[in-house]
Amino acid sequence: MKLHRVIISGGGTGGHIFPAIAIADEIKMRNPKAEILFIGAIGKMEMEKVPNAGYTIEGLNIVGFQRKISFSNFLLPFKIAKSLLKARSIIREFKPQAVVGVGGYASGPTLQAATMLKLPTLVQEQNSFPGKTNKLLSSKVKVICTAYEGLERFFPKEKIRLTGNPVRHEMVTIGGKREEAINHYGFNSAKKTILIIGGSLGARTLNNALVGNLKVIMDQEDVQILWQCGKLYFEQMLETMNQNIFDSVKLVQFIERMDLAYAAADIIISRAGAISVSELCLIGKPVVLVPSPNVAEDHQTKNAMALVNKNAAVLVKDSDANEHLFSTVFELLKNESRMQEYRSEIKKLARPNATVDIVNELEKIVG
């Protein structure tokens, strides 16, 4: 059935927001007249990113449970109750055909209200280890679209659809772009290129590992590095680099053209957020994953292990990065047969039609 009015809820991080926008874009591509309303959490990044993408968003005054002792934890039940009432009011006024939850603080009360109102509901779970909100909602929603196998441990098996994660296709379309990418970054086409990405804010561990291994890196004459250090660390890293001037490392705060960065890379060092991992599977390059330990339920390690267990990526622990990350990368670069094996295996895990499949499932539950 054609979708005319849909609510999409969730956010908090780019890993929730960008899949939500990708789903909205697919709905609009199928029906340009469709009305889509987002529901997010006041003060979170979705309140800026969603309007920038051209969609309307309403905000709930909701926060998460703090793991340390905090006064806000005592207020949480009242905020949840108030958010549930507001979400119910928004849904009744907007009258959607269906409600989609992508995870994040606002997703819980929105989907809870939608199920109470007997509306078709769909959850999109990005990670290999689900968040608490989606686990709690799983018994009530109609369909759960997942990116990883084996989630029957957490969700009712009959509701699971293995679709993959929605990604921004302009980011992963790299065919025939290597020469443009090498020229764009002023690189040498004869050298191997290492891409280091730690997210828009940066990853302290990856940055410290590079700084701690500058001497070793300078000795690698056939290697060049594109290093996205993140806006939190840019000034500090720039100062460090100016004191160690050499041509083989290009330091950037943020990468605007990820397609060119991916196209230039021979090997990629990355955190293991769900959307990053989904993009890397589509890219099909050898990957060394350094999962962040500072995430709920250590889900980045579980995301990474889903690839490592299929011989599709290498894992270096966050605590071992300074000592082992670059030695692991340089050894891998010298072993072309292993590089080729990783290229082949990671591509098998790619799900390029994820967004289409998710909207297909949404149309089915509405129909």
Image (tube, rainbow, N blue to C red):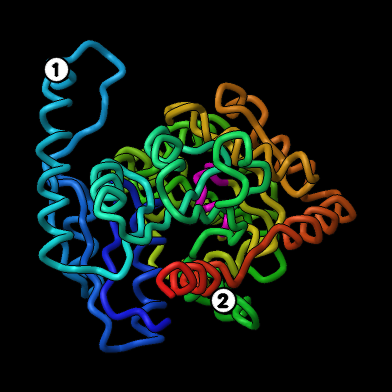
Pick whichever of labels 1 and 2 is earlier in the sequence.
Answer: 1
Which residue is at the front of the view, 146 or 141?
141
Q: Residues within 10 Å of mark 2 (few under 14, many from 20)?
A: some
Residue drawn 61% across and 43% down? 218
Q: CA distance from mark 1 to mark 2?
A: 47 Å
In the displayed structure, 150 sits above or below 268; it is above
Whether the magenta-drawn stretch holds residue 307 is answered as no
Instruction: Indicate the position of residue 139 as horizontal and vertical percent values.
Output: 45, 41
- Looking at the rendered structure, the kind of residue marked 2 is Thr
What segment carries the magenta color?
270-278
Residue occupying the far right of the picture: 337
Q: Is residue 362 visible?
A: yes
Residue in the picture at 40% in, 71% down: 366
Residue at the farthest top position: 69
Measured as percent of width and height from the top left, residue 314 is found at 72, 41
- Taking depth in this image into account, of 307 and 247 the one nearest to the observer is 307
State the residue position of label 2: 173
Work out whether residue 185 can be spotted.
no
What residue is rendered at 35% in x and 79% in y? 3
**In the image, is residue 110 above or below residue 185?**
above
Image quadrant containing the N terminus: bottom left
Residue 110 located left or right of residue 25: left
Of residues 218 and 328, which is closer to you in this image? 328
Out of 189 and 42, give the one closest to the viewer.
Answer: 42
Please give left or right for residue 318 compared with residue 27 in the image.
Answer: right
Identify the secondary structure beneath mark 1. helix
**At which x and y percent is residue 294?**
43, 27
The disc at residue 74 is 1
